C-alpha cells in the first residue's frame, strides 16, 4: 500500500500522472474531461491540450490558438471582447508568462463553470441578444460553446476535417459512451 502511494506521488511529481485540479501551473498534454459525467449516455471526453495549444488549430488552420481563446478570464480587462467581462489576470496568459516564479496558476474551467445542480458558488451567466432570458453557463453549456463553435467553423471552412474534428452533433465519439 505504502509503496503504491509513494509510486503515485513520484509519478505525479514527475508530471507523468496528472489529476484534474482546480488550478495548476502545469499545462497538461492530454486530459480526460467529463470523467464525472452525470449522464447515463455521454461519458468521458479525451482532449489533447498539446495539439490545441501548439499546432495551427484556428478554424482556418492558419494560426496557433492564443491561450485566452479558451482561458478567457486569464487576460486584463482591457483586452476582453464583449460579451466577456471577467478578468482575473493582469497580463495576457502565455507559456512564458506562466513560467514566471510569481505567476498565478491557471484555474480549470470547472472552477467556475459548475455542473448543473451544484449550488456551491454562483453560476456564470450571460444574456445573449437572441435569447429571452440569461443563459446559465454550466460546464455542459460553456464547454459545448467553446469546443463546438470552433469545430463547426473549422469544418465549414475546411470540409476535409469532417470525421477528424468532432462537429457539434458528433456527441459520440467526442464523448465515449457512458457506463
Ligand atoms: C482549445 C482550448 C485551450 C487552449 C488554446 C489552451 N488551453 Fe489550457 N486548458 C484547456 C482545457 C479544456 C483544460 C483542462 C481544463 C480543466 O481541467 O478544467 C486546460 C488546462 C490548462 C492548465 C491546467 C489547469 C488545471 O487546473 O489543471 C494550464 C496550466 C493551462 N491549460 C495553460 C494553458 C496555456 C498557457 C495555454 C496557451 C499556451 C493554453 N492553456 C491553451 C483548454 C485550452
Ligand atoms: C467536442 C466534443 C463534444 C461534443 C461534440 C459534445 N460534447 Fe458534451 N461535453 C463535452 C465536454 C468537454 C463537456 C464538459 C466536460 C467536463 O465538465 O469535464 C461536455 C458535457 C456534456 C454533458 C454534461 C455532463 C455532466 O454531467 O457534467 C452532457 C449531458 C453532454 N455533454 C451531452 C452531449 C450531447 C447530447 C452532445 C451532442 C448533441 C454533446 N454532448 C456533444 C464535449 C463534447
Ligand atoms: C474565473 C471563473 C471562470 C473560469 C476559470 C472560466 N470561465 Fe468561462 N465564463 C466565466 C464567466 C463569469 C462568464 C460570463 C462572461 C464574463 O463574465 O466574462 C464566462 C463565459 C464563458 C463562455 C461564454 C462566452 C461567449 O462569448 O459566449 C464560454 C464559452 C466559457 N466561459 C468557456 C470557458 C472555458 C472553456 C474555460 C476553461 C478553459 C472557462 N470558461 C474558464 C467564468 C469563468
Ligand atoms: C478555437 C478552435 C478550437 C477549440 C476551442 C477546440 N478545438 Fe478541438 N480542434 C480544433 C481543430 C481545428 C481541430 C482539427 C485539427 C486538424 O486535424 O487539423 C480539432 C480537433 C479536435 C479533436 C480531434 C483530435 C485532435 O486532437 O486533433 C478532438 C477530439 C477535439 N478537437 C476536441 C476538442 C475539445 C473537447 C474541445 C473543448 C474542450 C476543443 N476541441 C476545443 C479546433 C478547436
Image (cartoon, grey):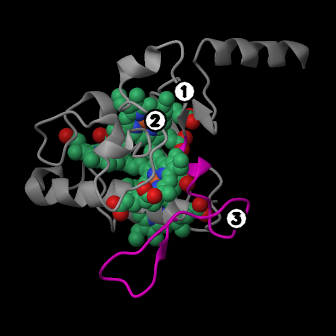
Label 2–label 3 contact, CB within 8 A: no
Is any part of residue 162 visible from this angle?
A: yes
Disc 2 residue crowd, few under 14, some 14–19, many 20+, Cα 10 Å: some
Secondary element at tag 3: loop
Location of ligand 1 given as a quarter of the image: top left
Secondary structure predominantly adopted by residues drawn in magenta: loop
Percent across and percent down for residue 52 are 32, 36
Query: Label 1, on which residue?
Result: 104
Drawn side of residue 23 relative to residue 149, left or right? right
Q: CA distance from mark 2 to mark 3?
A: 26 Å
Spatial distance from mark 1 to mark 2, Cα to Cα? 8 Å
Where is residue 145 shown, x and y percent of the image? 37, 62
State which tag comes first along the sequence, 2 or 3: 2
Query: What's the residue at 43%, 38% (across, down)?
Result: 74
Q: Which one is nearer the viewer's eye here, 46 or 72? A: 72
Horizontally, residue 35 falls left or right of residue 47, namely: right
Quarter of the image that includes the N terminus: top right
Q: Above or below — where is 114 with respect to 29?
A: below
Q: Which residues are magenta?
A: 108-137
| Label 1 with label 2: CB-CB less than 8 Å | yes
Amino acid at each position: 500500500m505504502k509503496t503504491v502511494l509513494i509510486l503515485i506521488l513520484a509519478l505525479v511529481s514527475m508530471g507523468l500522472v496528472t489529476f484534474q485540479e482546480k488550478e495548476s501551473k502545469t499545462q497538461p498534454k492530454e486530459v480526460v474531461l467529463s470523467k464525472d459525467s452525470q449522464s447515463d449516455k455521454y461519458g468521458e471526453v479525451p482532449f489533447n491540450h498539446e495539439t490545441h495549444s501548439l499546432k495551427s488549430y484556428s478554424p482556418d488552420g492558419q494560426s496557433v490558438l492564443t491561450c485566452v481563446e479558451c482561458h478567457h478570464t486569464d487576460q486584463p480587462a482591457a483586452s476582453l471582447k464583449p460579451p466577456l467581462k471577467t478578468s482575473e489576470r493582469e497580463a495576457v496568459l502565455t507559456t512564458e508568462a506562466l513560467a514566471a516564479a510569481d505567476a498565478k496558476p491557471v484555474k480549470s474551467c470547472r472552477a467556475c463553470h459548475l455542473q448543473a445542480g451544484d449550488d456551491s458558488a454562483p453560476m456564470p451567466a450571460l444574456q445573449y441578444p437572441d435569447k429571452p432570458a440569461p443563459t446559465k453557463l454550466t460546464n455542459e453549456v460553456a464547454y459545448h460553446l467553446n469546443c463546438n463553435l470552433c469545430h463547426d467553423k473549422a469544418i465549414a471552412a475546411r470540409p476535409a476535417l469532417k470525421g477528424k474534428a468532432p462537429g457539434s452533433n458528433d456527441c459520440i465519439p467526442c464523448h465515449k459512451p457512458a457506463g
